[in-house]
Image (tube, helix red, strand yellow):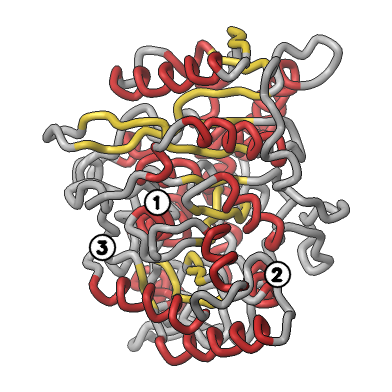
Amino acid sequence: MHTKTIKELSTLLQTKKISAAELATLFLDRIGQSDLNAFLHVDRELTLQQAAQADLRIANGDVTPLTGIPIAHKDLFVTRGWRTTAGSKMLENYVSPFDATVVEQFNAAGTVTLGKLNCDEFAMGSGNENSYFGAVKNPWDKRAVPGGSSGGSAAAIAARLAPAATGTDTGGSIRQPSALCGVTGIKPTYGSVSRYGMIAFASSLDQGGPIAKTAEDCGLLLNAMSGFDQRDSTSIERPKEDFTRSLNDSIKGLRIGVPKEFFGAGLAADVEQAVRTALAEYEKLGATLVDISLPKTELSIPVYYVIAPAEASSNLSRFDGVRYGHRAADYKDLADMYQKTRAEGFGDEVKRRILVGAYVLSHGYYDAYYLQAQKIRRLIAQDFQNALTGPDRKCDVIMGPVSPTVAWDLGDKTDDPVANYLADIFTLSTSLAGLPGMSIPCGFGQGEKNGQRPVGLQIIGSYYDEARLLNVAHQYQQVTDWHLRAPD
């Protein structure tokens, strides 16, 4: 039962071949036996209460495609009754008095919450090693990272601990862990999913999205979690749409842009081979490969690591020990309390980014760093638009690798922050442009000790083109089985 897709589970629930309570119990038992450290908070009683409510809804005929489906939430979405820590000591015991909009929407659809998922502290990291509560292990090879920051979400789906999970993507944090764990994840267009109740890292980049086994499942989840929210000033006011509406459309004639910058010297041979094989499969489906250029790709790392820390330094100023969260036990005065609280409550990577952010926003450096980064960000977005839109557009979607390598070993990059940053080279530009992008499994590469580790194919589209991306991914998943493979 744990290997079935959301679509299959929904059919079983609505035909009463299994109850929501039985399904929730199955996954709770699997979570209890896991040693991946993917979950930070599980409350069996709360989960089974929600399952009973879902069963009542099904009995009364009040159902959606997600009614009774178990789901786990990344620990950045505040959730009433559950701890919400953001992977940080600063919020170790915080329980929110309200639900994030995304959680509200899933509750309204009748999903059953399994618990809260581990993540890099305040979503800052590429390997899920920055969590105060310890690293998550990759279920394909427990010596490896699962990717970050949504590593707990991707690992839980890969290990079949949950059929659905939420994630957040600031610079690749849905797509990269999905790739390294061999699951499917999509980052929608910026502003499509409400950020209300999602603990902020970089407000102009943060975006929630779903992770699941298949593109079809991600479409069902995105149907529930997207939509305008007046409580979020960055939310886009657009009519609700069915993201699964074109899943079965033919992709014959699709033009796939292949950026030369995504296949340079830094790309591992095993990853390139898997991606090239996937592109060849698309050609068999009737698509055409088009060589394109995204010349500002190499600038995405310095641009991102100016803009994101700048916004983080502002957003994280609220964690001062005064209103909620950790407070130092011994201090002399208010300034001393601030200093000690933040020194004790934040981890090294969070402190590093706060310092960088405060520096680039300081007097005398704002124009030289932050303003220049915002100008280049506009140029990065223009590269994509030149390829995807307008009268001279070259392609309908863009494809390439998600990560330059397969998952690396736990601890390998702990002392080298820049090496961690470079792991996001192929995902950052999409986030800076605010475009939708997704990762689907497309094969395996060899780990450092010759263990199989997954490879992800990245699919990027123009603004509000999620339905097309899901269609393109679904058609590939109809003729391959990478998305159905699970670790032992």
In the rendered structure, the answer to whether residue 93 lies left or right of residue 67 reads left
Q: Position of residue 239 (x, y in %)?
A: 88, 53
Amino acid type, callout 1: Arg
In this view, the residue in front, 26 or 466, is 26
Q: Real-space Cα distance between discs 1 and 2?
A: 44 Å
Q: Position of residue 49 (x, y in %)?
A: 52, 91
Secondary structure beneath label 1: helix
Q: Nearer the viewer, mark 3 or mark 2?
A: 2
Q: Position of residue 197 (x, y in %)?
A: 64, 71
Question: Can you identify the residue that label 1 sits on?
Answer: 352
> Which residue occupies 57% across, 55% down?
210
Q: From the image, which quarter does the N terminus lie in? A: bottom left
Q: Real-space Cα distance between discs 3 and 2?
A: 31 Å
Question: Can you identify the residue that label 3 sits on?
Answer: 36
Determine whether 178 is above or below 41 in the image: above
> Which residue occupies 32% across, 57% down?
159
In the rendered structure, the answer to whether residue 190 lies left or right of residue 262 reads right
Q: Nearer the viewer, mark 1 or mark 3?
A: 3
Secondary structure beneath label 3: loop
Q: Is residue 323 visible?
A: no
